[in-house]
Amino acid sequence: MKKNIIVYIVIGLMCALLTYGIAMRIRAENSSGTTLSESIRENEIKTEILKLKEKYDKLYKTVEKTEKSLEKERENAANNNGELVSLERQIANTNILLGTTEARGSGIKITINEIAIVQTKNTQMKNDLINIINELYNAGAEAISINGQRIVNITGIEFDDNILKINGTKIISPYEIKAIGSQDTLSMLARPGGYLEIMELRGLTSKLSKENNIVIPKYTGTYNFEYLEKGAE
């Protein structure tokens, strides 16, 4: 009986020792597993950090490249803006010369009164207006109007049924001619022996005055080109 008890005690101690050994082994393995897991996690984090840093470096280089491109675009825009302003001025000046835009500036105003209107005088008046226009252009006029009608290179001055027409619009005396340009040069029309004096010898009266704020309306007709070919692009 005592022997059996001793056997049971030895077996119990062995079981206890075995259990302790297994527990220690499991604890060691658990401890080792935790350390290994933490080590793996640290490596993963380091890898993620390296990937993020690589992405950041790429993004930073992209931002730098974009900033340089933007700076270059700003410089080009500034240069193009100057060119655009110059181009807009050229277009505006061209439109004024074509008569498609209202013109303002200093120049002269001539008022011509016809005393008696007869067919022969109207025929002569047409020639007179054409000669005055030519003299004004020769004197450097940049814009001309007669009784509110803008004179352009396709303007027609017609004499039909004893009626004078400019751009298809009837005009009657007094004839008010406005011209923008050098006042001193344009005023030469009133010089002794000049065309205005010659007209006065035929019974017409004229008055020329220098004006600082002349407004000449735009041409209201249309340009029709039949033979002009499109320029090379």
Image (cartoon, rainbow, N blue to C red):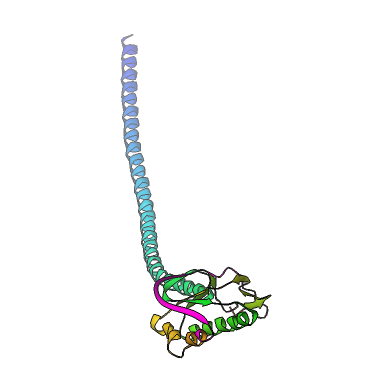
Residue 10: image location, x then y, percent: 31, 19
Residue closest to the eye, 153 or 198:
198
Position of 41 with respect to 178 (left or right) is: left
Residue closest to the eye, 86 or 128:
128
In the rendered image, the quadrant that contains the C terminus is: bottom right
- Quarter of the image for residue 24 reads top left
Q: Measured along the vertical axis of the image, is residue 52 above or below residue 6?
A: below
- Quarter of the image for residue 116 reads bottom right
Residue 88: image location, x then y, percent: 46, 70
Residue closest to the eye, 183 or 15:
183
Residue 105: image location, x then y, percent: 41, 72
Q: Is residue 208 located in the magenta-colored stretch of the structure?
A: yes
Residue drawn at the location 43% of the way across and 89% of the way down: 192
The count of marks equals: 0
Residue 38: image location, x then y, percent: 33, 40
Q: Which residues are magenta?
A: 200-223
Position of 11 with respect to 155 (left or right) is: left
Residue closest to the eye, 11 or 43:
43
Q: Measured along the vertical axis of the image, is residue 59 above or below residue 89?
A: above
Q: Residue furthest top?
A: 1
In the rendered image, the quadrant that contains the N terminus is: top left
Residue drawn at the location 38% of the way across and 52% of the way down: 51
Q: Residue furthest bottom?
A: 193
Q: Is residue 192 located in the magenta-colored stretch of the structure?
A: no
